[in-house]
Image (cartoon, grey):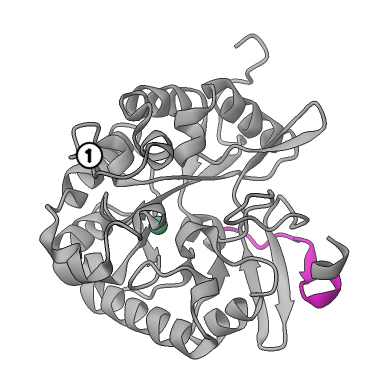
Amino acid sequence: MGGTPPVSESRVRHFFTVDVEEHFHVNGFESWVPRSDWDRYPSRVALGTDRVLDLLARHETRATFFTLGWVAERHPALVRRIAAEGHEIASHGDLHRRIPTLSPDEMRADVRRAKRTLEDCTGAEVRGFRSPSFSITKGHEWALEVLIEEGHSYDSSLFPIRRPDYGYPGALTVPHVIRTPSGPITELPLATASLAGIRMPAAGGGYLRQFPLSLMQRALRQYETRRVPAMCYIHPWELDPEQPRIAVPWPSRLRHYRNLEKVAPRLESLFAEFRFGSVFDWMGAAPREYPAVTLGRRQAVSA
Ligand SMILES: [Zn+2]
């Protein structure tokens, strides 16, 4: 901690975000937990969300909650409680469907329904969106146009890494503006760390559980050196080590249940060292200059 600068107002406030969904909504469970069965599983979302809210209250920190419309329909009081505590409600879509599985019209219907449900819940405008499993991937840049046309002003779906099931390798790693035929949208990509010249995912969630805490600490310090916020995320179910285990094959068990008990202490360590805030508060601050890019076929081919 010798090189850690003192906490002051001039320090970067990283984005702390929560993808509000149930423990059985994980896309990796889709083959075993069909959507038609969702209402038969025990709800745990309020329990995990309350643990996040407690952490944020103790550290006097506001955050952004990317919430499923499906959750808001069944737990409107929970969504109103999140908003009443000063946090931002944003959209995680309605039914947690990955973008590549949808046509543009299907995605439009999904995000429109989620935005309306969330706005009806709190009365506040929903500005932001995060796709399930960071699924705005190469070849699906049209999703950003749908978001703009449906009234979203920022997106946080691009993960500048290469993974078998998601990632947008080649995306900028810092906040930027993406120009599209439907207009501009602010993009807040998920945080990565540079380790021996290799770009590593270091945004929280599974990476907070599976990798040493030091990787995420390194990432946040690297962003502070660049004077830009890092985008971090967590799920309520990751703060719920007692959740019932769903009978899925062992790779999925490992990916989703390993080290759940370590999440709370690791988040405490991060909150002790770093400052966090919501996207809403950052967007409302004095305007800054950010790089603007155009995505599309040219980049998709060259990457
Ligand atoms: Zn999700």
Q: Is mark 1 within 8 Å of ligand 1?
A: no
Q: Position of residue 162 (x, y in %)?
A: 69, 50
Q: Which residue is mark 1?
A: 245
Q: Going 38% across and 76% down the picture, which residue do you hit?
A: 125
Q: Going 60% across and 11% down the picture, which residue do you hit?
A: 1
Q: Using residue 96 as the reference point, say whether residue 299 is left or right of it.
A: right
Q: Position of residue 20 (x, y in %)?
A: 32, 55
Q: Using residue 60 as the reference point, say whether residue 12 is left or right of it.
A: right
Q: Is residue 126 above or below residue 135?
A: below
Q: Position of residue 65 (x, y in %)?
A: 37, 56
Where's the C terminus, which quadrant? bottom right
Residue 287 drawn in magenta: yes
Badge 1: few (under 14), some or many (20 or more) residues near its Cα, within 10 Å? Answer: few
Quarter, ligand 1: bottom left
Q: Is residue 15 above or below residue 90?
A: above
| Residue in front for this viewpoint, 72 or 143 | 143
- Amino acid type at circle 1 is Arg
Q: Is residue 112 above or below residue 130?
A: below
Q: Using residue 168 as the reference point, say whether residue 59 is left or right of it.
A: left
Q: Position of residue 44 (x, y in %)?
A: 17, 48
Quarter of the image where one finds residue 78: bottom left
Q: Going 36% across and 37% down the picture, which residue do you hit?
A: 253
Q: Which span of residues is magenta-colored?
A: 285-298
By secondary structure, the bulk of the magenta-drawn segment is best described as: loop
Quarter of the image where one finds residue 187: bottom right
